[in-house]
Amino acid sequence: MTDEFERRHGFPPGANVVRPANRDDQAAARTLAQVSLIPADLATFYDSIGDVTWADVGNGYFLDPAHDVLLRIREYGVVDVDVDQTAGGLVIGSNGGGLSYVAGPDGTVYRTRTASLDEPELDKVADDLRQFLELLERSLARFIADGEPGHL
């Protein structure tokens, strides 16, 4: 992706990395699992991946480190992901355009319609984290091929 980036866009690429989890990341993931209902696949993800930063794919795609997710829960609580407001989701990242990705306790991944998390309107984007990561991969492939990441 970065080979043609500067020629295509006129400026050098920024940070575009999938960072492996270190011990601090893994400790934060364990703490996160203790304080919140976290989907099993997200716990597995955080055991291996520290965070994802694709700053140059469209507006950017970001999957936050576990310690940021944990901090957000402590400061703001969980995000209501159902109409009955009985299920709390975790903000796990963003699209760089102000919209957030939220993982529900059942593993479903949602995207907010606006930048506000106070009373968010959510759209389901994936049945689980695996499907969400596959959609991210497709966005990256599309961006490499034609410069457009799509609408994840």
Image: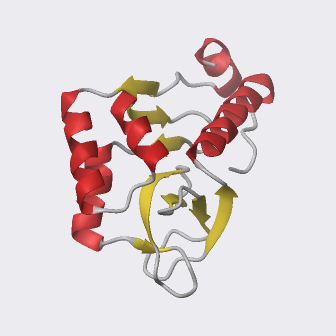
Where is residue 17 shown, x and y percent of the image? 46, 25
Where is residue 38 shown, x and y percent of the image? 39, 56
Residue at screen point 52% across, 21% down: 12
Residue 61 falls in image quadrant: top right
Query: How many marks can you see?
Result: 0
Residue at screen point 56% across, 79% down: 82
**Front residue of 13 and 40:** 40
Q: Is residue 143 above or below residue 73?
A: above
Where is residue 83 shown, x and y percent of the image? 58, 85
In the image as oriented, which residue stretches furthest toward the bottom?
84
In the rendered structure, the answer to whether residue 79 lies left or right of residue 31 reads right
The answer to whether any part of residue 30 appears in the image is yes
Q: Is residue 43 above or below residue 37?
A: above
Residue at screen point 53% across, 77% down: 120
Colour scheme shown: secondary structure
**Front residue of 55 and 30:** 30
In the image as oriented, which residue stretches furthest toward the top?
3
The answer to whether any part of residue 58 appears in the image is no
Q: Quadrant of the N terminus?
A: top right
Where is residue 104 shown, x and y percent of the image? 50, 63
In the rendered structure, the answer to whether residue 64 lies left or right of residue 54 reads left
In the image as oriented, which residue stretches furthest toward the right?
146
Residue 52 falls in image quadrant: top left
Q: Is residue 105 above or below residue 13?
A: below
